[in-house]
Image (spheres, rainbow, N blue to C red):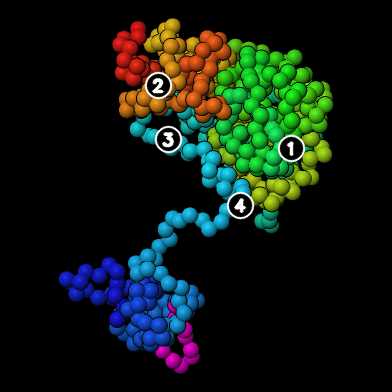
Amino acid sequence: MVQSRKQNSSSGSSSSGLGARGIYENLREQIVAEVYGRGDVLPSARALAVELGVSRTTVTSAYEQLAAEGFVVIRHGARPRVAIKIAHSEPGDLGHTAAEPHSLSAFGERLRSRAIPMRVASEKLVADFRYGDMSASDFPTLAWRKAMNDAALGRPPKLSYGDPCGSIRLRSALQGYLWRARSIRCEVGEIVVVNGSQQGLDLCARLLLDEGDGFAIEEPCYPMARSVFEMTGAIAAPVEVDAEGIRADLLADVGARLAYVTPSHQFPLGSVMSMGRRQQLLGWAKEKRAYIVEDDYDSEYRFDMNPIPPLRALGGASNVIYIGTVSKTLSPLLRIGYVVVPRELQEVFAHAKRLTDRHAPSLEQEALATLLETRVYESHVRKARRQNARRRAALLDALQAEFRDLVRVEGAEAGLHVVVWFHDTPPAMAASFIEKAASLGVGIYSISPHYFDQTLDFDQTLDRSCLGLVMGYASLTESQIHRGLKLLRRAYEEATGSGDVS
């Protein structure tokens, strides 16, 4: 008889009411547990259906699934038999359990050994200063919903795969926007729409780097960029960053096929690359026949500074690959970014994008095109800039009120985060400080993971090692920021035993 795994032996309840799936699972379990031995005859479909009070069709479906998986053999006119050869499984071990893979590629092994830990957001925090989070209240819900509805209603008569480089309508709209907002002149064919800037970085890594190649990257840097390049087997060459951006003069002796930079707002320190450094960097790339990957991740947010054109907009920038995103203006959930590639790379990027995921989601592309064409997107960016300017001011005021001369703030002129250096507090205190802050409901994040030597945070202004935090503020209200900083001061006092810092 088929025994239900949910059956209560003391009640004597039957398996009546089982569907085909339940019958199949119970029979499979009994076969694996050798309740039915190899070659044993099972009840006929008719007999088992009567026994269980189900239709014969239901039992037949269960038997057919068992036969398809090799557990039983079915012959016309005969009762099913348990197969002679069945892959051995321990009784009760019917689910898949985690195990070491038999073999991984070199890429897989590198990824397994060097993977960046995933951070899980906590809804219980009073204030989470995690960089990259955006406020849901800032999202233009009504405009986006209307644009998505229009895109769905305006679908073509035939549903088919689209251009791997993205919707021609969106790319045309991006072409105009990049000229208006960033002074970038490019052809529509040079734009590739990607699933967020991270996919753009991944395409660059796989197309431009081989195992053993060198790549130059800022020190400190964006860890996800460093990781995606290293996963190819390429070797990082960290280059010091100062108040003018990456030390381009140090690149002369670096053997690198590409350089990854964030010139508009260095991540994480926040410096803006000077024009002189930009020309130096372009000159190096031309001399070495190397590519520059320019990540313009949050250039829309400039507060106390005049914008400097991106590298891609300067003369002699034919070997610059420009990456932009809407993650910091609309939402990181949309996963929409774009890459402006040199003409000689258009075809290979299109093929790589097609092999990766065919193309980015079509409806979202059409919706974004609508927002760009109607200038709703630019209006939204201006509004978001004003809102984040208020958040920034609240954060700077609260840091001054709570910590006064104990901290120095870096990179506040642009972007959606600041770096806060704690004078006379060694980096070794970071773990206890972060833990204490979390216990009080405040999420804070050390700058250490952005350095190659994660045991050393370095404030160049103070010329000594001290604890640094990367503090994002775009997801918080002004009241949350003030409340969070009051709690952070308390956490600092308890973690360092310094008493009242005010």
Q: Which residue is mark 4?
A: 105
Look at label 2 and name its amino acid.
Answer: Met
| Residues tagged 3 and 1 counted as in contact (Cβ below 8 A) | no
Tell me where residue 502 appears, x and y as whole percent.
35, 7
Observer-nearest residue: 409 or 55? 409
| Residues tagged 4 and 1 counted as in contact (Cβ below 8 A) | no
Q: Secondary structure at mark 4?
A: loop
Tell me where residue 5 appears, x and y as whole percent.
29, 69
Q: Which residue is painted at 51% across and 20% down in the image?
A: 457
Q: Which residue is painted at 71% across and 20% down in the image?
A: 250
Q: Secondary structure at mark 2?
A: helix
Look at label 1 and name its amino acid.
Answer: Ile
Does the rendering let one see residue 27?
A: no
Q: Residues within 10 Å of mark 3 (few under 14, many from 20)?
A: few
Q: Which residue is mark 3?
A: 121
Q: Which residue is mark 1?
A: 191
Distance from disc 4 to disc 2, alpha carbons, whole Å, reads 38 Å
Q: Which residues are magenta?
A: 71-79
353 lies left or right of 20? right
Assess whether residue 307 is covered by the magenta stretch: no
Which one is in front in this view, the residue at disc 4 or the one at disc 1? 4
